[in-house]
Amino acid sequence: MSKCEQCIIKQFNSLRALGKDDLIRISGCKTSKFIKKGEILFREGESINGVYCVKDGVCKLSKLSANGKDQIVKLVVRGDLIGQRSLVTDEKSNLTAIALNDMEICFIPRNEIINDLTNNANFSLDMLQEMAKELRVADNIIVDMAQKSVKQRLADVLIYLYETFNTDEKGFLGVMLSREDYASLVGTATESAIRILSQFKKEGLISTTGKHVKIEDLEGLRRVE
Amino acid sequence: MSKCEQCIIKQFNSLRALGKDDLIRISGCKTSKFIKKGEILFREGESINGVYCVKDGVCKLSKLSANGKDQIVKLVVRGDLIGQRSLVTDEKSNLTAIALNDMEICFIPRNEIINDLTNNANFSLDMLQEMAKELRVADNIIVDMAQKSVKQRLADVLIYLYETFNTDEKGFLGVMLSREDYASLVGTATESAIRILSQFKKEGLISTTGKHVKIEDLEGLRRVE
DNA sequence: ATCAAAACATGACAAATATCATAGATTATA
DNA sequence: TATAATCTATGATATTTGTCATGTTTTGAT
């Protein structure tokens, strides 16, 4: 099993703020897991009791709305932590986490890391800064959800996916989502997402082969309104 | 001028985590201001360079969307801090702050408080916990914006205002908003907000006298769909 | 390779929401 | 208190989005 103190992933999240000694200690108690596409890491309302560090793969954080539809709040990628919020507030999870492709993750139990939060100012400050950034992003999403049309939001999602996951050798987006996931990211009906993606195809903004999506005209997507 | 170390407001925000000495020091450099209804504390894109502590009054934090409409992201009330996020990340403000009624606020300059963030674990941990809570709220708003109808969101806003600001002697909501503000909270056109409020009136859920709104049937509002 | 299940696609229609126009009510201010 | 400016209200209509129905394609398991 790889060691936290040597793991390059830690550079991308608040664990970078820990000292070598702490990392070695954490390394000794962490567990490493492989999660298959579609598997649930945890559900809304469950106690996570620790944080996950994503070594590879992508996962969606979603919440069930009153009308029974899932809304994806965030995509978590390689390098991100999952569960910081519940760690900090000691609450049950507000969101459900489901793997969008095969993942490799490490799990650090709450007991091992909670003291670092109270004793290590570097660590808690780094986490504070990360959370402040997340909050800014969330505020911006609120504005977009409230003010932009479904079409604009879907175009935004495609741009976001392109910028976050880049493309594979063939030029397809580096992450494969179902139409239902697209709908759930945008906050619309699955049929509406399908229709608008079809429209984007007709307009030459994207092309698709099954679930593979290729961005054909990024600037065009930016001009969608 | 009142002293931070004796101020009861501090109990309601992260300043409670500071020691007496720090509070006395901060008290010496803070400035106290009265802001009139409608005045702008700061605009999106400006440097705040400190945090505001709200002693009295209400203020809206909003962001201009691409289509030119303001979206209210949050209402800030007595006891809240404003500008923690910019303080932590040292970025310019992402939001505009405008007073909804006459306010009394204290301003603590960045220089005086930034060291507490790095040196005082209690303080930064408290702020981290507050921000984690804000993030949960923001995630829930995202889901509501995406999945609930305008009518439901407006009902939610009325319930929120009732629970947050209570009522005055005559039973009216403790905060007065324009129809435009209601629309901007819900993320809809002003006319739509007006129409739905009229409908709520007809249905006996609320009554209005100018800008004064009275909740007549809280449970009915909860059942709106 | 075959079959069933799931995902995708699209038409037809209904419902929700935005926009434009216009008029009355309220508020601020000279 | 007169008057302009702003806010509220509502009708008419257009646009967006959701829902239901149905057929096709893709995927996964045997």
Image: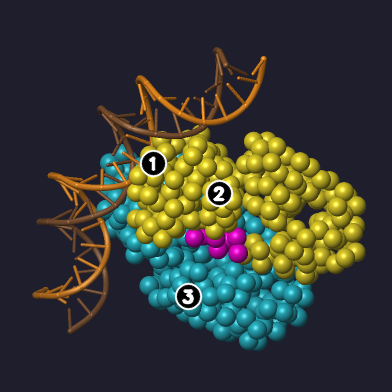
Chain colours: A yellow, B cyan, C brown, D orange
Residue at 39% from the left image edge and 72% from the top image edge:
B37
Q: Where is residue A2 in the image (x, y as percent from the top left)?
A: 86, 52
Image quadrant where one finds the N terminus of chain B:
bottom right
Q: Do the residues labelled 2 and 3 touch (CB within 8 Å)?
A: no
Residue A15 x/y as whole percent? 77, 61
Q: Is residue A206 above or below residue B184?
A: above
- Asked if marks 3 and 1 fall on the same chain, the answer is no
Separation (CA) of disc 2 from disc 1: 21 Å
Q: Above or below — where is A4 with respect to A63? A: below
- Circle 1: element type: helix
Mark 3 or mark 1: which is in front? Answer: 1
Task: Please report contact status of discs 2 and 1: CB closer than 8 Å, yes or no.
Answer: no
Q: Do labels 2 and 1 share a chain?
A: yes
Q: Can residue A6 be seen in this view?
A: yes
| Secondary element at tag 3 | loop
Residue named by callout 2: A170
Which residue in the protein does label 1 denote?
A198
